[in-house]
Amino acid sequence: MQLFDRHHPPLFHLLHRGQCTTLHQLKSIHARITVQGFASLHPSLALTKILYALTLLLSPPSLPPADSCTAYALALFRSIPSPSTFPHNLLIRAHTLLSSPIPALLLFARMRRSSVAPDSHTFPFALTACARLRSPDLGRSLHSQALKFGFAADLYVRNTLISAYASSLSLLEAQGLFDECPLARDVVTYNTLIDGYAKAGDIAFARKLFDDMPRRDVVSWGTLLAGYSQMGRFQEAISFFDQMLATGTRPDDVALVSVLSCCAQLGKLDRGEAIHEYIKKNRAKLGVHLSTGLVDMYAKCGCISVAVEIFESTPRKNLFTWNAIIVGLAVHGNGQLSLEYFNRMRAVGVEPDGVTFLGVLVACSHAGLIEMARCLFDEMESLYGVERELKHYGCMADLLGRAGLVEETMEMIKGMPMKGDAYVWGGVLAGCRIQGDVETAEIAAHHLLQLNPEDSGIYSIMSDVYATARRWEDVARMRKLMGDKRVKKNVGCSSVEVDDGSLHGRLNYEPFRIYSSFG
């Protein structure tokens, strides 16, 4: 096969036509170009085209391993004689796509020292790396460089400048750029600023910007919907999703995942099922994010069998997919099955994070696997490098408390790098009630009352502890304290939704999360 004729090298056509879809294929084409001599005749052209083709591969769902891509990109770049602006742009973009913003910005600095002039593409790539780092100072430095080279007025550059400032919550500067050119705005400009205000918690101003938009796209809707969800305004998010559908806008994965999360938080199984039906009708196949959202929604609503079915039918599973099923099974009492999924996750090479360990510790607690929990708790930092947080200590206190291992719990608390919260001390107090340990119960109650003096559960449990020890005067004292402080008893409640003839009851167990399971 001839490598090329005078005008159209056939192997390059494979790159341009998108027929090169894997890193292995790209390296094969590179090897053939090298063997047949074109890389020697025109090294800059050949290697730059290959580097460009590599950047096209650096996007989900077929993202190759980051380490091998980085090494290959650097090898290509370093083989280009006196690389111009374009190869620099490509490598900066590659670093950014591979979540390596610092090497991207270091390359930009080296580019400037080498007197290679940036262009209107250089700054958006560098600013995207800056946005990943959430550094306002770096943003200002790049802003001044863009002004110096005359690119600050470019719409693409301006939008990425707004993104860099917004990502670091420098909203005054982001808003200033937005206000400077009222006629030079597009839908991306609005979306970027809406995202900044939503992430900063100012959902009201984000909504005002949305309402002021002359034209909206699906990203505009999805960005604000995600903002409502992140702010915990779940019902508003669901209503906003309905408005989106009413306009004829087809939601993207961001909007669908956000609204599924809201359904999960509110226990709105019927709405979640309706959205699932919409997805079935409008998506040829499920991506990993939508699959994860569905697993999470069904698991949190108690439909474990459906959650498992969707999980098993998902061909590509990421860490969040595994976490959704592991935690979902654990909190619904399927401890052994949750641990089986954890072992499967490790077997396929997915590294656990803090959420994973929270799930497996809850699973151990429900299954009564104390030794397993101790082992996993120790391995978190020593084997997996996952830092223990308060919630992990709270799970261990809960588990050890259930087992009546109060002394071990107190030793764990002494070694904690932070102060215990209500879940940690709640586990201790519950264990003391099981063992009848009055002295330690008083210590735990003291800490709990400092955290929440109006929690009636503390007084009730202490009354039980004193009554078991036949310390009737202390029982009377607890009851008098409740009366003097006008502490109201926590009351369990249930909510029932009536919608299209369907009934869904959901226990609101939040007031009893610390204590009730130990009665």
Image (cartoon, rainbow, N blue to C red):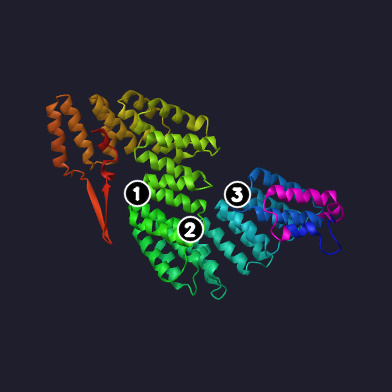
Mark linked to residue 99: 3
Determine the secondary structure under disc 3: loop
Distance CA(mark 2)–CA(mark 3): 20 Å
Q: Does the CB distance between marks 1 and 3 fall below 8 Å?
A: no
In the image, what residue occupies the spot 20% across and 45% down? 491
Q: Residues within 10 Å of mark 3 (few under 14, many from 20)?
A: some
Residue type highlighted by circle 2? Val
Examine the image and state in which quarter residue 181 appears: bottom right
State which mark lies toward you, 2 or 3: 2
Dominant SS of magenta comes to: helix
Q: Residues within 10 Å of mark 2 (few under 14, many from 20)?
A: some
Q: Left of 14 or right of it: where is 292?
A: left
Residue type highlighted by circle 3? Ser
> Where is residue 157 drawn, in percent x and y?
62, 65
Mark linked to residue 254: 2
Distance CA(mark 1)–CA(mark 2): 21 Å
